[in-house]
Image: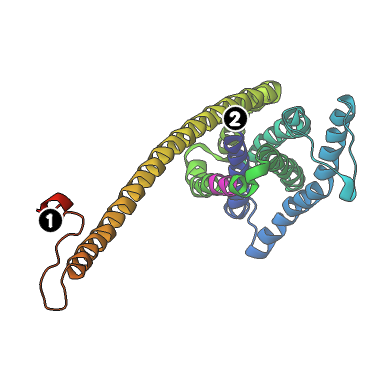
Amino acid sequence: MILLCLALLFAAFYAVSASIPARFAENYGYSTIDISLVFIPLGIGALVSTLTVGRMMDWNYRRHAQRLGLSVEKGAKSKQHDMLLFPIEQARLEVVLPFLFLGAALTAAYGWCVQKKVNVAGPIVLLFFQGYTLVTGFQSLSVLIVDLNRTSAATATAANNLVRCLLGAGASAVVNPLTEAVGYGWTCTIAALLWLGFTPLLLLLMKYGQHWRRKKAERTKAKNRGRMKDIGADQNNSKFTGDIQITREVQDNEKTVLSEEAQTQAPRDEASTTQDLENQVDNNGHYLPDTEHAIKPSIPEKEDQVS
């Protein structure tokens, strides 16, 4: 919304700038040097705008901050306010909207003055005020874009440059053919009407912008909570799976240890059996009878011996 309005504003500025050489050469018979001097009032108006619009925006920002009971400090102690609690759209657009309406009226008046070939002083003065109003609107909207995208200001600025340069290039290419078709007065009037046609979008933004931002923040917060729950569930599942894996590894390790002990015990038993057999052989190589199970010789009793 803001990008579109800002791009149309920039396109109108470039349409006026690109049409100056052809219009003043045809309607006033100016040479190249004379035409170059015509750009001076437009540039001076833009310069004055850069020196004053910042002060106006700061003043209006402080006014809203004081109304909300927020402190505004300068220097290193200054702190950024929470934009969810601050009507930044209202603070910025209250400054820019009057200049947008005034700039549209001046653009249409400038076109008709050049087409009717009025005294050159008229278009020159209108060019000064056009430069002031157009650049004021452009700077104010650019600041608002950055205010609404503080965490991604570079991305917002890049998008702003892309859109406004595309429309500015298109306006520069169309302005002279359109002038030949419908006249310069109607060309500037069409540009002003397009400009004014999108201005109600800024009015809606000024009224409902803070509410929309709060709703968006609530949706984002709820979405993040859902993601955190999903992450927690995944972590619990991973922990349970890890416990099972650890249990399986412990069981496998126990089986391995038992298997190694069994393999170690088998050679020991074999060695013990061999040693026992060696102990049962005498010096002549004859096996000795098992003393435990050997047959004891019978000894005659005394009565048998007497008889």
Say which quarter of the image contains residue 299: bottom left
Pinpoint residue 201: horizontal percent, then vertical percent: 62, 26
Would you say residue 298 is visible in this rendering?
no
In the figure, 226 relative to 184: above or below? above
Pinpoint residue 236: horizontal percent, then vertical percent: 48, 33
Region rendered in magenta: 158-164
Q: Main secondary structure of the magenta part?
A: helix
Instruction: Give me the disc on residue 193.
Output: 2
Instruction: Give me the disc on residue 41.
Output: none
**Label 1 crowd bin: few (<14), some (14–19), many (20+), radius 10 Å:** few
- Identity of the residue drawn at 39% across and 46% down: 250
Pinpoint residue 196: horizontal percent, then vertical percent: 63, 28
- Identity of the residue drawn at 63% across and 52% down: 24
According to the image, label 1 marks what residue? 305
Which quadrant, please, contains the N terminus?
top right
Pinpoint residue 272: horizontal percent, then vertical percent: 24, 63
Q: Residue furthest front?
A: 307
**306 left or right of 158 in image:** left
